[in-house]
Amino acid sequence: MNLHEFQAKQLFNRYGILTPEGYLVTSGSQARQAAKQLGGKCWVIKAQVHTGGRGKAGGVVIVNSLDHVTNFSCKMLSQRLFTHQTITEGLPVNYVLIEKLSDIRRELYISVLVDRVSESIVFMVSPQGGMDIEAVATKDSNEILNLYVDPIVGLQSYQCRRAGSFLGLIGMAFEQLQVLMHSLYQLFTENDASLVEINPLVVTERNSLLAVDAKLDLDDNSIFRHAELGTMFDPTQEAESEVVAKKFGLNYISLDGRVACMVNGAGLAMATMDLIQREGGEPANFLDVGGRTTPDRIAEAFKLILLDRKATSILVNIFGGIIHCDLIAEGIIQAVRDIDILIPLIVRLEGTHSNLGRKLLSDSNMSIYISQDLTSAVKQAVKASKE
């Protein structure tokens, strides 16, 4: 689950991480009042959307008059923001954050994330802040330092000192980095985060550290332990299909292809997608309906698939184990009766009661291509998607 910048900064402040003073607003008049309260002559207007690259897309603007604060805030709040990371339709800007322009001597980068290869938490630091870290890695990997933290012993002081030396910090900034890193580690572990990023982390003219930006991603599987954080979820920043999937406990990710998939089990879903690509097609989604599928969930899964207008065929690949194939067949028949499915539907059933399930589908006299062989079903789905 992603948080907005302003939400991440609220959490930062609880852990003693300094951020610029700012106000969250939803209108031009509120923005103007916020700028007056902040004082100064220059302000930063930041669109609150779940994407990186906001500055390049016009989502971060520096202005030097109250009229500009009002006008640019109104403009942002009336549009959708498009970046290389957003969905095709872009993301709506429902809030903007007004901050006074910070004095900046240097821009640094720091993040904390889980490294699954080393099975540890890793700090990434770079003196090249304010840039895409991917671009920095491509240009010169020596500009990035990775510090691997053993989850048993935790972050060590020598690692913080090594980071400070690598970044070329001295005096108060060097000392503040030690405190900052321990605070980030505590925030990361206590809130079950998957990514915490500050880009840029700035060194001010007074040689103090300030988190000018904040990105925070939480592990979806841990939200039940953090009720307050769960309320920060913003459904307007997600694709409609993925919001619906969460509501009904379906694992769904939208992709760019044309063959929609409905599969039970993540491993089988991945194998099915691989087969689609091998046969010359492209999957339109990843959809795992789970091992305890019910007819009602099957119906909701079909509705979810049909939200994707680019899908031109549907492949249902079910291996009956805990759930019997005849119950899956009943769910498919009920869904086809209740929903207008105007694109080809290919169903492959195997496992417990698969013969009965295929017979139910055949006897329904519905326009369903039924297959026992997975490769044959995939070929038919790819062919239908192209026709």
Image: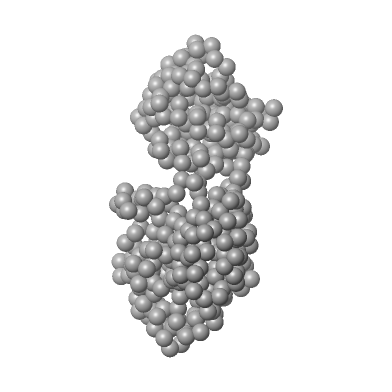
| Direction bottom: furthest residue | 171
Q: Nearer the viewer, residue 60 or 336?
A: 60
Residue 187: give x, y in percent of width and height. Answer: 35, 65
User: Which quadrant is the C terminus positioned in?
Assistant: top right
Residue 344 picture quarter: top right
Q: Is residue 286 visible?
A: no
Give the image's coloring scheme.
one colour
- Rendered position, 95 above or below 241: below
At x 57%, y 17%, the residue is 367
At x 60%, y 72%, the residue is 64
Numbered circles on residues, count? 0
Q: Nearer the viewer, residue 144 or 351?
A: 144
- Rendered position, 238 above or below 337: below
Residue 208: give x, y in percent of width and height. Answer: 45, 82
Left or right of residue 115: residue 127: right
At x 32%, y 61%, the residue is 190
Residue 375: give x, y in percent of width and height. Answer: 58, 30
Left or right of residue 294: residue 130: right
| Direction right: furthest residue | 387
Q: Is residue 90 visible?
A: yes
Left or right of residue 338: residue 324: left
Residue 73: give x, y in percent of width and height. Answer: 56, 59
At x 52%, y 59%, the residue is 29
